[in-house]
Amino acid sequence: QGYAVPKSETYSVVEAPKGEFGVYLVSDGSSKPYRCRIKAPGFLHLQGLDFMSKNHMIADVVTIIGTLDIVFGEVDR
């Protein structure tokens, strides 16, 4: 049931309101994906937190995270 796709892999991106949203799919030839990885825009923003919070006090990190407008549900891995 579902779509029969050939055995292959692909990475597609689309511009989302907060940045680049990417999906990586690997197919083994069946109707379900063998592997699916989703790269949310907030995940990349959160990776820059180390650089942005250097030479700041720990109390300032809360404000820095607030300015990034991160949705932790989308970056939860």
Image: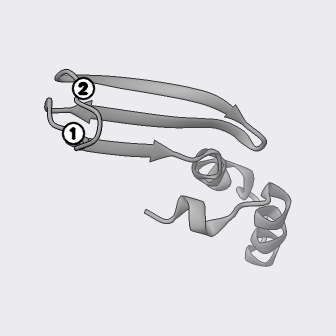
- Give me the residue at 76% from left, 64% from top: 65
Return the x and y of residue 72 as percentages of the image width and height: 62, 68
Residue placed most toward the observer, 49 or 43: 43
- Residue 19 lies, with reference to residue 57, above or below; the image says above
Does dot 1 land on a helix, a strand or a loop?
A: loop
C-alpha distance separating marks 1 and 2: 7 Å
Return the x and y of residue 37 as percentages of the image width and height: 38, 44
Q: Amino acid at mark 1?
A: Ser
Return the x and y of residue 73 as percentages of the image width and height: 59, 68
- Give me the residue at 64% from left, 45% from top: 41
- Residue 25 lies, with reference to residue 58, above or below; the image says above
Residue placed most toward the observer, 23 or 42: 23
The answer to which image quadrant residue 56 occupies is: bottom right
Q: Residues within 10 Å of mark 2 (few under 14, many from 20)?
A: few
Does dot 2 land on a helix, a strand or a loop?
A: loop
- Residue 4 lies, with reference to residue 44, above or below; the image says above
Q: Amino acid at mark 2?
A: Val
Q: Earlier in the sequence, mark 1 or mark 2?
A: 2
* Residue that carries the numbered disc 1 in the rendered image: 31
- Tell me whether the residue at label 1 lies in contact with that at label 2, contact meaning CB atoms closer than 8 angstroms: yes
* Residue that carries the numbered disc 2 in the rendered image: 5
